[in-house]
């Protein structure tokens, strides 16, 4: 599915990615994150299957697995070019550019995973400071320290 200015295609980061087909300015809306609202997360125990869940607020989840949600293909990056912002006026999140995005650039955002979540999700973004796990930006220094001290010593 295509939203004006984006297309989904194979990504060097993971699976399908969301790419800009035109330039986006800082603060410009890129794509809505559409889906079904749930009072509890669905069972996502199928290994190898992509998950498109967002926790909107405690106890409220958005399942973005629908084909009507092009933003589901935006991959995580430790050096993202957009962010997911909840637009209370329309009731769902939007990907918004937080720096200029060039045409043909992959659109990425920080998934904001906790330390526990990060343990099961390797990061393949390739950013210079990537810690190798999908984890929220504020938690990366702590994970980096943990990994440094937990390495096997000779």
Image: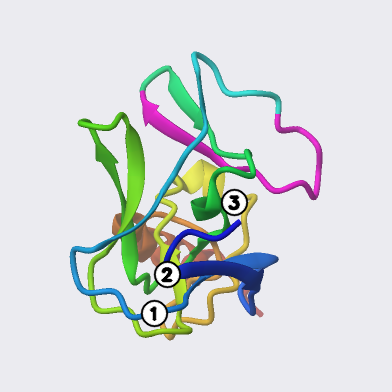
| Residue toward you, 127 or 32 | 32
Q: Nearer the viewer, mark 3 or mark 2?
A: 2
Q: Residue 31 got which mark?
A: none
Which secondary structure lies at badge 3?
loop
The residue depicted at 40 percent of the width and 66 percent of the height is: 145
Q: Is residue 149 above or below residue 51?
A: below
Rendered-image quadrant of the N terminus: bottom right
Residue furthest to the top in view is 39
Sequence-first tag of 2 and 1: 2
Q: Which residues are magenta?
A: 44-57
Q: Are marks 3 and 2 in contact (CB under 8 Å)?
A: no
Question: In the rendered image, which quarter is residue 103 located in?
Answer: bottom left
Please name the colour scheme applied to the rendered image.
Answer: rainbow
Q: Position of residue 122 (x, y in %)?
A: 62, 62
Rendered-image quadrant of the C terminus: bottom right
**Number of residues whose C-alpha sits closer than 10 Å to that of mark 3, classed few (under 14), some (14–19) or many (20 or more):** few
Task: State the residue position of label 2.
Answer: 5
**Number of residues whose C-alpha sits closer than 10 Å to that of mark 2, classed few (under 14), some (14–19) or many (20 or more):** some
Q: Residue 119 got which mark?
A: 3
What secondary structure do most residues of the magenta stretch adopt? loop
Q: Are marks 3 and 1 in contact (CB under 8 Å)?
A: no
Q: Residue 22 got which mark?
A: 1
Mark-to-mark CA distance, 3 and 1: 35 Å
Residue 154 part of the magenta-drawn span: no
């Amino acid at each position: 599915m295509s939203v004006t200015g984006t297309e989904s295609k194979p990504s060097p980061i993971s699976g399908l990615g969301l790419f800009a087909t035109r330039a986006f300015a800082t603060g410009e809306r890129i794509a809505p994150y559409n889906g079904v609202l749930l009072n509890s997360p669905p069972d996502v125990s199928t290994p190898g299957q992509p998950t498109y869940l967002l926790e909107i607020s405690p106890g409220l989840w958005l399942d973005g697995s629908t084909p009507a949600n092009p933003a589901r293909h935006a991959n995580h990056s430790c050096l993202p070019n957009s962010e997911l912002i909840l637009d209370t006026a329309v009731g769902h999140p939007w990907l918004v550019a937080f720096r200029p995005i060039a045409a043909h650039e992959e659109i990425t955002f920080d998934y904001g995973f906790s330390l526990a979540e990060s343990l099961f999700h390797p990061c393949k973004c390739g950013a210079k400071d990537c810690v190798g796990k999908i984890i929220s930006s504020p938690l990366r220094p702590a994970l980096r320290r943990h990994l440094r001290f937990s390495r096997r010593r000779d």
